Image (cartoon, rainbow, N blue to C red):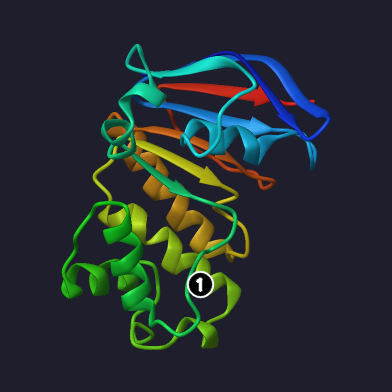
Amino acid sequence: MLQGRDLTCVRGDRRLFKGVSFTVEAGGLMQVNGPNGSGKTSLLRMLCGLSNPAMGEITWNGEAIKSLAGAYHSELTYIGHLSGTKDDLTALENLRIASALSGIQITEKQASDALAHMGLEGREALPAKVLSQGQRRRVALARLLVSKTKLWILDEPLAALDVMAVKLIQGLLDQHLTNGGMVVLTTHQDINITAASTIQLQLA
């Protein structure tokens, strides 16, 4: 269970939000909404432990995430709004290295199968710099296929994707939630996902 209690975010001399509280349980989806600059990405980074709230606390199964450190990070997969692919590495290399940095060692075949599932068969050996933005996004999102983590935190996962890729990602999210996983995401696109519980968190 992921909980936020009375979270406040301050950037510079500006307060982005205050008093934000929520509970996400197994099988639950939380969609974070709000205009640009409202603090959506800042909140997701807090949930990943990449930044600290000015006030409030984030807990995982009742314990503060800052005290859990690596034990918490091994339970989550975070994919930011930028694809994070390295231009000179192949799609295969990007996926294997990104997974390794997250503590997940995968074989070349596992990476190749994941990329094929994402519609990138035949492009595994191409450097990322020759791929389209949508294809680079697919490389980043292929991590979801090899991840064994319970909590997925996704910042604009559907950005730059075509209709077929959007349906593919929606299917992955549905399956993850059905299996008892949890998803926190931001998106400007309509998304149709079945969850045991759904929270629409609105930031002003």
Task: Report whether residue 2 is seen.
Answer: no
The answer to whether 8 appears left or right of 14 in the picture is left
Residue 44 percent location from the top left of the image? 56, 36
Please, is residue 119 above or below residue 179 in the view?
Answer: below
Q: Nearer the viewer, residue 15 or 82?
A: 15
Residue 133 visible, this orientation: yes
Percent x, y of residue 13: 83, 30
Q: In the displayed structure, does residue 152 sit left or right of residue 93?
A: right
Where is mark 1, residue-wise? 136
Q: Position of residue 164 (x, y in %)?
A: 51, 64
Residue 146 appears left or right of 6: left
Q: Position of residue 49 (x, y in %)?
A: 46, 34
Relative to 50, is 60 above or below?
A: above
**Quarter occupied by the N terminus:** top left
Q: Residue at x 29, y 36 (%)?
A: 70
Camera-nearest residue between 121 and 54: 54
The amino acid at mark 1 is Arg
Which quarter shows the C terminus?
Answer: top right
Which quarter of the figure has residue 199? Answer: top right
Name the residue: 26% across, 56% down. 146
Q: Is residue 9 above or below residue 122?
A: above
Q: Residue at x 34, y 82 (%)?
A: 124
**Residue found at x 59% / y 54%:** 81
- Residue 181 quadrant: top left
